[in-house]
Image: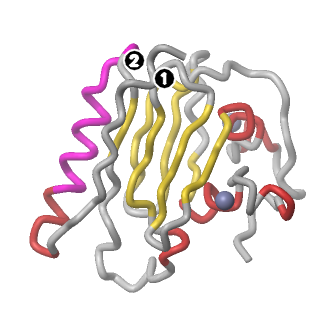
Amino acid sequence: MANVTCSAIVTAKRTVQNLRITLGAARKMAALRRPKLHASARVPRSQGAGTMSDPRIEPTMVKAPHGARTMEIEWADGHKSVLPHEILRGYCPCAVCQGHGGTIHFVPGGDLSLRDIQQVGNYALQFTWGDQHDTGIYSFRYLRSLCQCDACKPTFSPGSVP
Ligand SMILES: [Zn+2]
Ligand SMILES: [Zn+2]
């Protein structure tokens, strides 16, 4: 693990005035990111629309160092989620992976190298995997439910945040 050098963790501190700009910058950053570079993006806090008042599903930092097998998300309530790529890919919520209807289930296989992360609106992340699979839209609430940290793992229940 030689390449865990990247992520200087900076706590996201935003003023209300630059939220919009920050969101735009994050999008631009994601769009311009080259596949071989590590992906790390600060996620803007809630836009104040009242739709994301739950700090448990407000990410303040997403860390996905290139070559790592685990993504980390820090949330506004201070929780730090551990999200192995295997879990993220296996629980890809897209219709191709999950089919239609039924409960969410683990789908083994698929490329586990994370190539890109795009923020979708103010509510989700979209991942591009090594095999170009990119149809999964992971809402923040869903990502939180996939957390594999010591505290969350025992009650792992994909798709629900207690
Ligand atoms: Zn999928
Ligand atoms: Zn957790």
Q: Does the magenta stretch include residue 11?
A: no
Residue type, mark 2 in image: Pro
Query: Closer to the camera, 54 or 139?
Result: 54
Residue for point 27% across, 44% down: 27
Question: Along the horizontal axis of the image, is 83 left or right of 121?
Answer: right
What is the quadrant of residue 44 in the picture?
bottom left
**Residue pointed to by mark 2:** 35
Residue for point 77% across, 36% down: 90
Query: Closer to the camera, 44 or 8?
Result: 8
Query: Closer to the camera, 78 or 156?
Result: 78
Give how far across and how far down residue 135 sits, in percent: 59, 37
What segment is highlighted magenta in the picture? 22-36
Identify the mark nearer the N-term, 2 or 1. Answer: 2
Where 19 falls versus 115 (above or below)?
below
Find out whether the residues at labels 2 and 1 contact each other: C-beta distance under 8 Å. yes
Question: Real-space Cα distance between discs 2 and 1?
Answer: 5 Å
Asked if the beta carbon under badge 1 is closer than 8 A to the nearest atom of ligand 1, the reply is no
**Residue pointed to by mark 1:** 115
**Marking on residue 59:** none
Question: Along the horizontal axis of the image, is 23 left or right of 81?
Answer: left
Give how far across and how far down residue 157 sits, in percent: 82, 61
Where 146 falls versus 35 (above or below)?
below
Q: Ligand 2 falls in which quarter?
A: bottom right
Question: Along the horizontal axis of the image, is 41 left or right of 14?
Answer: right
Quarter containing the N terminus: top right
